[in-house]
């Protein structure tokens, strides 16, 4: 979905300004022609009395030209207004479509993973991660070979620089799989807010970044909601909560480490840049040998050999869909961010957790109480307040 729509949006955006530039150029040409006529009039006045009289006594000859210029100017102004309105309409429609695609792909990814791990009771979380990343590598590599996306070549220098980040990346994905198997979707979204707390503390010690009182108040609300949600969770599972806490630390570490490694990684690439597609290809490619090693370490090979799920075509269809959705999140998030900006992207990402949590409770028949539902809703609102506080802090003045 992302790969098919990205070129279309770029094409639409590039055609309209091109037409507008042509209109502006036409307007400049007419304006220059009119100034030339005026300049000739001034030269004629200086040249001699006879020619000055000709110019002065012939206003009717100049009037049709002025009317024609006014008429053309009016048409150009209307055409510019029409192009501007068309451009804004295309922008709004593209932003809505990209935002909807981002929300659907991000929600669907978590829900489909929950179906595979819980509804099918699939215990091969590392194998699922490995299969999803393999699909991502195949798709991005194919798109790169056909010239639809640009990616950096994988050199040994780039691999050595990126390897520490990739180890954290793999751990983040695996712990997310393990926790999602035991915890309901709503509580996972609330507990993930703890990642923001860890990241904020890490920014202070690593980057000397300071946060205002609104940010800290939002983080405090996140902690309270996570504690209250865990206490009132009727389906509380200690193993699942333990994996989720580890996942929060790994996710925060990935975010903080990525900031440090990005600049170094750009220096060892041929173009001096590292776009989203290159990072997707780099992360997923390097995760394959490490994931394969972990499959043997955690003895998932015997489980895969014995489970009847691998002989079910429907199960393979669902797991393959999860792989496509994982890659769709990368494409649609980049598309949505390009069409709107960090402000809208951050707010929509926080608000998107609300329908995701409600859908997860209803779809998987999660037993809940009024206290637990209030804690979940409280935590989701805290995430929205946190996003707003960060945005207000980033705004000048």
Image (cartoon, rainbow, N blue to C red):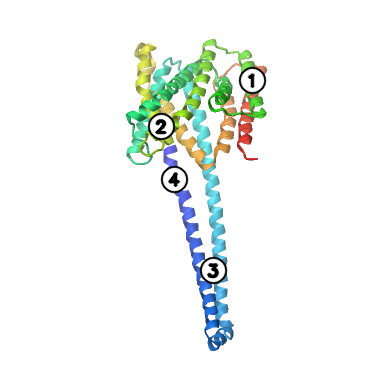
Q: x and y percent of residue 358 in the render?
A: 59, 25
Mark 2 or 4, which is nearer the eye? 2
Which mark identifies residue 265?
2
Which quadrant holds residue 92? top right
Spatial CA span between label 2 and label 3: 54 Å
Q: Earlier in the sequence, mark 1 or mark 2?
A: 1
Q: Is residue 250 left or right of residue 395?
A: left
Which mark identifies residue 72?
3
Taking the image as drawn, is residue 315 in sight?
A: no
Q: Callout 2: few (<14), some (14-19), or many (20+) C-alpha neighbours within 10 Å?
A: some
Q: Earlier in the sequence, mark 2 or mark 3?
A: 3
Nearer to us in this view, 120 or 7: 7
Q: Earlier in the sequence, mark 4 or mark 3?
A: 4
Q: Earlier in the sequence, mark 2 or mark 4?
A: 4
Q: Which residue is mark 1?
A: 225
Q: Which residue is mark 4?
A: 8
Spatial CA span between label 4 and label 3: 33 Å
Q: x and y percent of residue 99 in the render?
A: 53, 38
Taking the image as drawn, is residue 271 in sight?
A: yes
Q: Residue at x 38, y 31 (%)?
A: 281
| SS for dot 4 | helix
Above or below for 287 versus 9: above
Above or below for 232 versus 68: above
Nearer to us in this view, 313 or 153: 153
């Amino acid at each position: 979905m992302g790969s098919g729509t990205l070129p279309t949006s770029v094409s639409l955006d590039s055609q309209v300004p091109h037409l507008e530039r042509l209109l502006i150029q036409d307007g400049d040409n007419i304006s220059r022609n009119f100034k030339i006529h005026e300049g000739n009039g001034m030269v004629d006045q200086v040249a001699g009395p006879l020619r000055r009289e000709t110019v002065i006594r012939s206003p009717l000859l100049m009037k049709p030209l002025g009317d024609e210029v006014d008429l053309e100017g009016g048409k150009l102004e209307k055409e510019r207004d029409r192009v501007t309105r068309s451009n804004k309409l295309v922008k709004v429609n593209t932003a809505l479509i990209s935002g909807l695609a981002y929300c659907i792909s991000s929600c669907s990814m978590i829900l489909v993973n929950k179906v595979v791990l819980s509804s099918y009771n699939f215990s091969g979380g590392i194998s699922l991660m490995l299969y999803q990343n393999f699909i991502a590598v195949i798709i991005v590599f194919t798109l790169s070979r056909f010239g639809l996306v640009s990616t950096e070549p994988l050199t040994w220098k780039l691999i050595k620089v990126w390897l520490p980040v990739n180890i954290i990346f793999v751990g983040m994905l695996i712990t997310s799989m393990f926790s999602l198997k035991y915890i309901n979707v709503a509580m996972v979204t609330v507990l993930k807010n703890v990642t923001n707390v860890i990241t904020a503390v890490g920014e202070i010690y690593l980057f000397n970044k300071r946060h205002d009182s609104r940010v800290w108040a939002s983080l405090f609300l996140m902690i309270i909601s996570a504690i209250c949600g865990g206490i009132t969770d009727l389906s509380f599972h200690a193993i699942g909560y333990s994996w989720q806490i580890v996942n929060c630390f790994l996710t925060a570490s990935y975010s903080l480490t990525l900031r440090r490694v990005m600049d170094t990684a750009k220096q060892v690439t041929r173009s001096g840049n590292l776009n989203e597609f290159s990072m997707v290809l780099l992360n997923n490619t390097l995760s394959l040998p490490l994931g394969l090693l972990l499959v043997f370490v955690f003895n998932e090979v015997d489980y895969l050999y014995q489970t009847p799920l691998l002989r079910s075509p429907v199960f393979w269809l669902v797991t393959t869909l999860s792989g496509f959705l994982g890659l769709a999140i990368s494409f649609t998030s980049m598309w949505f961010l390009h069409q709107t900006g960090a402000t809208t992207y951050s707010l929509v990402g926080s608000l998107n957790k609300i329908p995701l949590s409600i859908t997860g409770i209803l779809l998987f028949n999660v037993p809940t109480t009024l206290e637990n539902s209030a804690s979940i809703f409280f935590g989701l609102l805290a995430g929205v307040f946190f996003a707003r506080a960060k945005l207000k802090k980033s705004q000048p003045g």
